Image: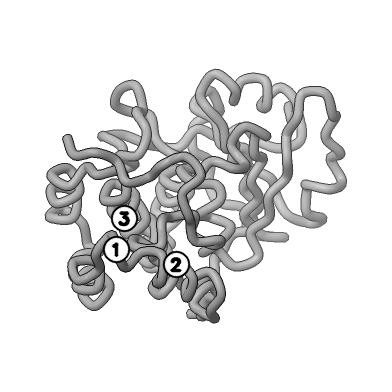
């Protein structure tokens, strides 16, 4: 395994949170979503570059995040959207129900470790339907260990939900955003062999050829200059699709 290039205190892009050499902001596109997406984020996740809850905020239009701290009670009215049916995704929920029609659907995603999610679920118990998704296979989120099959990142839970509801086109567009971020994260950690294997099985390889070519051209000694441009340019602003 190669040495990680992500060092404590190293320069990062202010938006995608990756080192400038591996910045993916040029291809991060805000996507409209047929669901109202809210994230209940544990305070320990908020500043982690690997948080896929933060990635959802960057690429899903009108997604919202709500901070969870054990010492501060949550306010239902600040999270639950009027008129919508709320689904709280959790492996211990009810079997996947039919999608609601009137009022639309709001999904609440718990962005935390598996151990932390239990306490967060208790804090919102009774606010909506606790729903279990038909999730199977192995996570594509290689930046953290998922501790076995059937465990997935917050972003992947949203992808499973969209696909289960028949919103496959939206899920496909968001999957591209997810996979290019994971690939760049692997590169930033010096895991070059794993990154190459990941890309070989990813639709991001075909979707973003120009960015990948730019990655191969960039060199570590160019990072400081590129970083200054990235952090201070309009590249951090996203397009809308």
Residue 172 visible in rendering: no
* Residue 111 x/y as whole percent: 57, 37
Q: Is residue 190 above or below residue 25?
A: above
To which quarter of the image does residue 88 belong?
top right
Give the spatial CA distance, label 1 vs label 3: 18 Å
For the residues carrying marks 2 and 3, which lies nearer the camera in this image? 2
* Residue 155 x/y as whole percent: 46, 47
- The label shown at residue 21 is none
Q: Earlier in the sequence, mark 2 or mark 1?
A: 1
**Residue labelled with disc 2:** 227
Closer-to-camera residue (28/171): 28
* Residue 35 x/y as whole percent: 59, 59
**Residue labelled with disc 3:** 184
Q: Residues within 10 Å of mark 2 (few under 14, many from 20)?
A: many
Query: In this rendering, would 88 be left or right of 235?
Result: right
Q: Earlier in the sequence, mark 2 or mark 3?
A: 3
**Residue labelled with disc 1:** 221
Q: Is residue 20 above or below residue 10?
A: below
Closer-to-camera residue (229/49): 229
For the residues carrying marks 1 and 3, which lies nearer the camera in this image? 1
Residue 103 visible in rendering: yes
> Residue at horizontal 31%, vertical 68%?
222
């Amino acid at each position: 395994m190669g040495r990680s290039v992500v060092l404590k205190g190293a320069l990062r892009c202010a938006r995608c949170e990756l080192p400038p050499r591996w910045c993916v902001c040029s291809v991060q596109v805000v996507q409209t979503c047929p669901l109202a997406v809210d994230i209940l984020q544990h305070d320990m996740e908020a500043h982690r570059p690997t948080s896929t809850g933060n990635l959802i905020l960057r690429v899903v239009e009108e997604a919202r995040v709500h901070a969870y701290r054990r010492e501060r009670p949550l306010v239902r009215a600040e999270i639950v959207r009027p008129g919508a049916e709320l689904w709280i995704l959790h492996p211990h929920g009810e079997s996947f129900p039919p999608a609601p029609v009137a009022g639309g659907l709001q999904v609440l995603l718990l962005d935390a470790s598996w151990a932390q999610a239990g306490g967060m679920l208790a804090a919102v118990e009774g606010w909506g339907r606790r729903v279990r998704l038909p999730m199977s296979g192995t996570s594509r989120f290689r930046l953290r260990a998922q501790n076995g099959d059937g465990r997935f990142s917050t972003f992947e839970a949203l992808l499973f939900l969209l696909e289960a509801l028949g919103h496959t086109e939206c899920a496909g567009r968001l999957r591209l955003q997810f996979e290019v971020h994971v690939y760049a994260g692997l590169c930033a950690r010096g895991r070059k062999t794993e990154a190459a294997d990941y890309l070989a099985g990813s639709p991001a390889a075909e979707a973003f050829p120009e960015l990948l070519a730019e990655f191969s051209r960039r060199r570590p000694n160019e990072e400081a200059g590129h970083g200054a441009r990235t952090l201070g340019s309009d590249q951090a602003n996203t397009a809308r699709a």
